[in-house]
Amino acid sequence: MPTTRLEFRPIVAALAVPALIPLPLLAQDCDPADLFAPDVTYGVVDFPTSVVIGDLDGDGDADLAVANLPGRVSVLLDNGDGCVEHDVNYGAGFGPYSLAIGDLDGDGDADLAVANFGANNVSVLLNNGDGTFAPDVLYDVGDGPRFVAIGDLDGDGAPDLAVANNRSDGFGVLLNNGDGTFASQVAYDAGDGPLGVAIGDLDGDGDADLAVANVFSADVSVRLNNGDGTFEPEVLYDAGVDPYSAAIGDLDGDGDNDLALMGGSERVSVLLNNGDGTFAPRVRYRAGPSPRGFSIGDLDGDGDVDLAVATQGGDDVSVLLNNGDGTFAERVLYGAGSFPYFAAIGDLNGDRAPDLVVANRNTDNISVLLNQCGPFLPVITAQPGSLVADRGADPVDL
């Protein structure tokens, strides 16, 4: 049961689609240290590692889905008055480490895809239209899948899947048949120990490219799309120590998509796009002890993209605000539960200011941190590619 009552309102899931970016408008001057209220917790099953936000039951309110290591997906629906009373659980494969949300079967409601690290497969849970889900359908992928991302890779209008296969040193692409079923995986090489995968248009040609974070070779594989869901040979860029997760978004406001990678040594690496799908050398920023899964989005309403990082070594979430040019201010820490594994961004209470949800692995709950500095004025702007990170985790075996 929740420790307090929260109101949930609609958000847009940022999954390799044009994003909603607020124009610069703060309701009040707000100290970065006061951007978010103290966390409020909700219980889930066991060992939550990832969380996504979206309208799952079609009622216009924002719901939550959480991946739990014992093989369950917890769905927390808004019951209509802004209160989430309890979680409803659905089966997935063994060791689900990440999940992604998107309309996979084209019926207008939000479905789920789950990477099952312990079972070498991906679960697809199709929405029944009311926030309940059909039994999962399993698709084989490579060895040790850690992260899954959703995006239209072959340009046919149906969202496809990309999966980072940690033990196979590669990633897999599963093309949608157009009805929420998927063709067999097509495997591609990556670096050593791929963990994170992100989808977005990196070279400005209108199709979706891939970035894969390789934890053991300390680099990121950039794979440009040939336009049909096949990919050019990888180009490798230095990503720093132990890059666990990756995100794609326009960090410096120049109209092309950049890379952010979260890794060891308490650092996030930012690689700015040269404008053609190649990248400048990384610049590092301190994120906090043992950073894991992170998301990117405009947290302070100034029109540029910020970072929210789950830092498991400090039991908190680290917020790095953008200076407006793709550089970042010193981190500000907010408390979360024990061993936070992933931080998601979305407007949970309908005040037009992005809030945070953090999956806390060792306390079997999620933390909700409401933004205190809204409302912001939301305006649709053209934003190529994805503004969401893959689901972070560490490279150790189950």
Image (cartoon, rainbow, N blue to C red):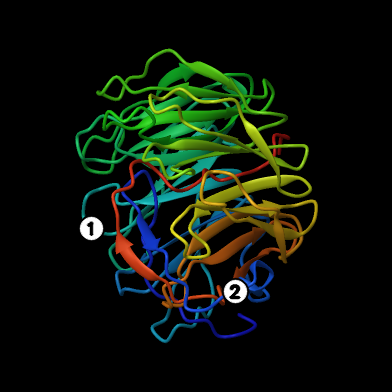
Image quadrant occupied by the C terminus: top right
Residue 18, position in %: x, y?
A: 31, 49
Residue 63 picture quarter: bottom left
Q: What's the residue type where badge 2 is placed?
A: Cys
Q: Assign a secondary structure to mark 1.
A: loop
Residue 306, position in %: x, y?
A: 54, 53
Image quadrant occupied by the N terminus: bottom right
**In the rendered image, the vertical position of residue 398 relative to residue 331, given as above or below:** above
Q: Judge from the rendering whether residue 225 lies leftward or rightward of residue 64; answer left or right.
A: left
Q: Residues within 10 Å of mark 1 (few under 14, many from 20)?
A: few
What is the count of numbered marks?
2
Residue 74 visible here? no
Identified at 76% across, 45% down, the residue is: 290
Residue 291, position in %: x, y?
A: 71, 46
Name the disc covering residue 284, or none. Answer: none
Who comes first in sequence, dot 2 or dot 1? 2
Q: What's the residue type where badge 1 is placed?
A: Gly
Q: CA distance from mark 2 to mark 1?
A: 38 Å
Q: Residues within 10 Å of mark 2 (few under 14, many from 20)?
A: some
Query: Residue 315 or 269: which is nearer the viewer?
Result: 269
Query: Residue 226 or 65: which is nearer the viewer?
Result: 226
**In the rendered image, the vertical position of residue 375 relative to residue 179, given as above or below:** below
Q: Judge from the rendering whether residue 162 lies leftward or rightward of residue 282; answer left or right.
A: left
Identified at 47% across, 81% down, the residue is: 7
Can you identify the residue that label 1 sits on? 108
Q: Residue furthest top?
A: 233
Residue 319, position in %: x, y?
A: 64, 57
Can you identify the residue that label 2 sits on? 30
Q: Assign a secondary structure to mark 2.
A: loop
Residue 347 visible here? yes
Front of the two marks 2 and 1: 2
